[in-house]
Amino acid sequence: MLSPVLLDQLRAHWRRLRKKSSTWLFPGNRWHTGARPIDTKTPRHACQYAARRAGITKSVYPHLLRHCFATHLLEAGADLHTIQILLGHHDLKETARYLHLSQRHLHATASPLDSLVLKGRSQPEE
């Protein structure tokens, strides 16, 4: 899932590169001109640096962004099966275990019992 906003940013990044790599969008070395991709530690260091600049004192790492992505999708109304596909999980149990529901999401969930029409009670609100 690639947002149009992110795609625009990636294109701008590509245009700013002095030397274009024919293989890597994020080539390695200090000037981003290397023949190899960026080091695997680079995204982790970027997350930690961004967290410090934002005043976040908790540990921040790239996998945390995956958790946040999934949680925000769930809170925005995406169903677990869709999130499962986007995360690349083979088993829905992986996705259900992976997500942490926010209190706001839990409290916003209506009980199916609220839709019952009971004797002496007015129609349920919709």
Image: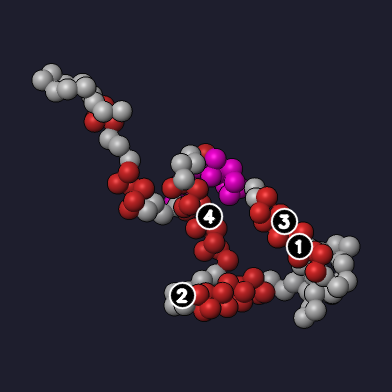
Is residue 79 visible to us here? yes
* Amino acid type of the residue tagged 4 in the rendering: Phe
The residue indicated by pointer 2 is 56
Circle on res. 46:
none
- The reply to whether the C-beta atoms of the residues labelled 3 and 4 are less than 8 Å apart is no
Callouts 3 and 2 close, C-beta under 8 Å: no
Can you tell which of label 3 and label 4 is closer to the viewer? Answer: 3
Q: Nearer the viewer, residue 7 or 43?
A: 7
- Residues at circles 2 and 4 in contact by the CB criterion of under 8 Å: no
Q: Which residue is mark 4?
A: 69
Residue at screen point 56% across, 74% down = 50
Give the Cα separation between the discs numbered 1 and 2.
28 Å
Mark 1 or mark 2, which has the lower sequence index? 1
Mark 1 neighbour density, 10 Å: few (under 14) some (14–19) many (20 or more): few
Q: Is residue 76 left or right of residue 111?
A: right
Q: For the view shown, which residue lies furthest in the top direction?
A: 119
Q: Position of residue 62 (x, y in %)?
A: 58, 66
Q: Amino acid at mark 1?
A: Ala
Q: Amino acid at mark 2?
A: Ile
Tag 3–tag 1 contact (CB < 8 Å):
yes
Q: Distance between the Cα atoms at labels 4 and 1?
A: 23 Å
Residue ID at (55%, 70%): 61
Which tag, 3 or 2, sits closer to the chain's start?
3
* Location of residue 12 (image quadrant): bottom right
Q: Give me the C-alpha separation between circle 3 and circle 1.
A: 6 Å
Q: Which residue is mark 1?
A: 12
Counting from the top left corner in percent of width and height, residue 43 is at 64, 70
